[in-house]
Amino acid sequence: MVKSAKHNPARGHRTTSERSTVLGRAFRIEPINVDSVFSVLDAVSWLGDADVGRIAQFAGVDARTAGKVVKNCVLFRLVNRKNANFSMAVPYPFKGSKDEKKAVIREALLKLPLVFHLRQFLSFGENSAVALRKAATMIGIEPYDEGAVSPILKWARELEVLEASVTTEALVDAATETKERRHRGHDERIVAFLSHSSADKVFARRLAADLTAQGITIWLDEENILVGDSITEKIGQGLAQSDFFLIVLSANALASEWVKKELNQALIAEVEKRKVHILPVRIDASEIPPLLKDKHFADFAKSYTEGFEKLLTAMKRRDT
């Protein structure tokens, strides 16, 4: 079984804007239930770059609830915020199971410096209140307001991330084992990781909807490059469960930082060592990047219908 790289949140890079949400009174976790998060994350994942009003309407919740959820999800690095709009910061199984969605949140919590230090102090025998205060001090939350920080304990307990045996590596390995069991059991279900530039959001959502209608489980990954991001950390469980890595290519995508920074040999190696078929999806007349020249690709440039039929045939054969 392939082991993923060790992740140490304590050494993670934080930009100035990220630090501003950690330091001082700006850091406040809303006391909401984990179960209230899924419909909101579904909305953020599907809409991409939407404000709270649109997210609330799509999710079928009131704007106040949606606002609290996205606020927490920004703190937990599940969601990115740009001005008044929000988009997913991690791959997300829009039509996946509740367990798959919970696993995404668990992985995000495990990567938080606050949770990293909380687990550390709990392992030293501190009680939860003391461990939380010390963890907050370690990441610079000053002055410390227990009421503003303590909701993380409820999330961490409910999602069982305080156990020493639960690690990001263990979650990825469990996802890999899930795929292997599916294959050993001759399960015909197909799982695909759909990675695309935000410039191609409309096409990607259409493709995701059409593939979902064919019974294919889709992990949506709208690339948002942040300083210090690691592709091998971002892809995590979504890629580990997938049979296919679909990457949408266009003139916009090829000109973006998304391709320049992340479509590299490290990505190709990580995908292939997990026995995931790489299948480029070309949506205009752009040249296929050199790293993907040897890959069969689905061509949607002339006809969406023809491109989709060929893509679906290739995926159902599991032969690219």
Image (tube, rainbow, N blue to C red):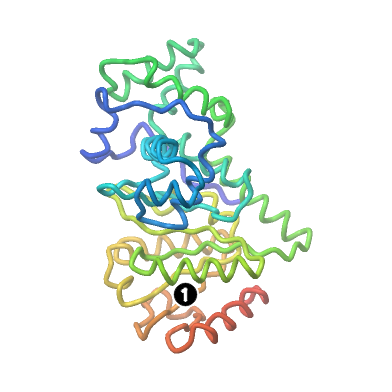
- The percent coordinates of residue 64 (x first, y second) are 40, 36
Looking at the image, which is closer to me, 82 or 130?
Answer: 82
- The percent coordinates of residue 77 (x first, y second) are 39, 41
Please give the count of numbered marks on the rendered protein.
1
- The percent coordinates of residue 26 (x first, y second) are 27, 28
* In the depicted structure, whether residue 161 falls above or below residue 208: above
- The percent coordinates of residue 177 (x first, y second) are 67, 50
Badge 1: residue crowd in 10 Å (few <14, some 14–19, many ≥20):
many
Q: To which quarter of the image does residue 121 belong? A: top left
* Left or right relative to 59: residue 50: left
Looking at the image, which is closer to me, 288 or 25?
Answer: 25
**Point 33% across, 15% down: residue:** 145
**Point 46% across, 23% down: residue:** 151
Callout 1 amino acid: Pro
**Point 35% across, 55% down: residue:** 49
**What kind of element bears circle 1?**
strand
Q: Name the image quarter holding the C terminus.
A: bottom right
* Left or right relative to 313: residue 9: left
* Left or right relative to 8: residue 257: left
* In the depicted structure, whether residue 33 falls above or below residue 98: above
Residue receiving disc 1: 280
